[in-house]
Structure formats: C-alpha cells, structure tokens
Image: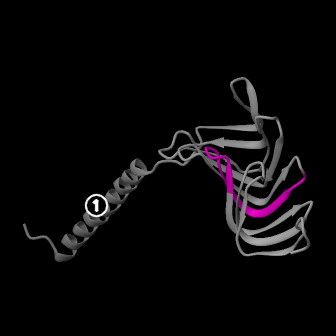
Amino acid sequence: MNLPKRYIINVVTVFAVTLFFGCESNFKEVQKINFSEFVPGSDADTVNIKYTDSGRITGVLISPKMLDYSNLDFPFTEFPKGIDVTLYDKKQKRTFIKANYAVSYKTTGIIDLQGKVRITSEAGQVLETEQLYFDQKNEWFYTERKFKLTDAKGVSFGQGIDFSKDFKVINSQRISGEIESDDDKI
C-alpha cells in the first residue's frame, strides 16, 4: 500500500496538533494544582475588639474592616480601611492611635501602621508620620520615616524616631524645630 506523501503529512500534522493542545490542557491543570489562593481565613466588618490582661482592659481596637490570614504559614491580620486604637497603661492613662491602614503580624508581635498615622498621649503629645511600627511585646514605637512631634514645649520635625507608648522615653534622629527647655530655648 503506497500512500501519497501529502496524505502522510496531513495525518502527522493532525496528530501533532492534537498532541500539542492535549499537553497544554494538562499543563494548565498542573498549574492549578500548584496554585494556592491568597484569601483570608475570615473577615469582619465593623470590629470593636477589647484586649484585657487579668481582667483589666489594656486596649480597644475599632476598625471598619478586618481580614484575618491566620491560615497562612506567616499569619497576620490586616485592617485595610484603617484603625482607631486606645491603649491603656497600668494607671489607665490612655494613648490614642489612628492610621489609614494596619497589619498585625502574629508571629513577631509587630504592628505596621501606615497612612496618616497619628498618636496622641493623654498629656497632649502628638506624633504624626506616614508609617510607624509598634512592637507589642516591648510596647515600643519606631520609624525611619519623617515625623512631626508636637508637645507643650513646641514642635519638632525629624526623620527617624523611637519611643515608649507613654512618650516618657523618646529617641529621635535628624531633628529640627524650636523646642523650649527648662532653662531657655534650644
């Protein structure tokens, strides 16, 4: 049986095209197996969370939206629409925190505050910056970003600051402004 050369080429072409499209379909299925969706384990609207220690309130967090990613290898909680937090010390003195966005990393205990971050102490000290980190374990704030610090002694500007949650200890870098000291103006 002698088949024309043209017929053999057509059969081989059809076989090759079928094989090619068949493999592409399997390749896409393999890709789907290796793809894991990045979705929160839970989400909540209008949250009001109270944190306590030995029956004493240590903090209140209010947010219009919370996404909990505790189902991931590096768990975190995201607040994409901002937060409003009140922290209480042992004498019930308050520190108020506002930010347009926040992420709380469960493993490290670090909270990343972003977008018009404003912290106000009960004594009237105000710190404003675009990004600030809070170490929950050490109750310590820090940033390398530009900031504005306002208190009864004046207004100062700088880049890079770290301080305790009650503003009692403040370490600032590259600072400028007019601040009144007990003796005279610096």
| Magenta region, residue range | 124-141
- Secondary structure mostly taken by the magenta-highlighted segment of the chain: strand
Residue 35 image point, x, y percent: 44, 51
**Vertical relation: 89 (above or below) 24:** above
Residue 58 or residue 11, whichever sits in front: 58
**Vertical relation: 175 (above or below) 120:** below
Residue 181 or residue 31, whichever sits in front: 181
Residue 13 image point, x, y percent: 27, 69
Q: Mark 1 points at which residue?
A: 19
Check disc 1: other Cα within 10 Å, few if <14, some if 14-19, many if 20+: few
Rendered residue at 55%/47% (across/down): 108
**Vertical relation: 45 (above or below) 161:** above
Q: In which quarter of the image is residue 128?
A: bottom right
SS for callout 1: helix
Please give the count of numbered marks on the rendered protein: 1
Rendered residue at 86%/56% (across/down): 125
Residue 13 or residue 67, whichever sits in front: 67
Rendered residue at 26%/66% (across/down): 16
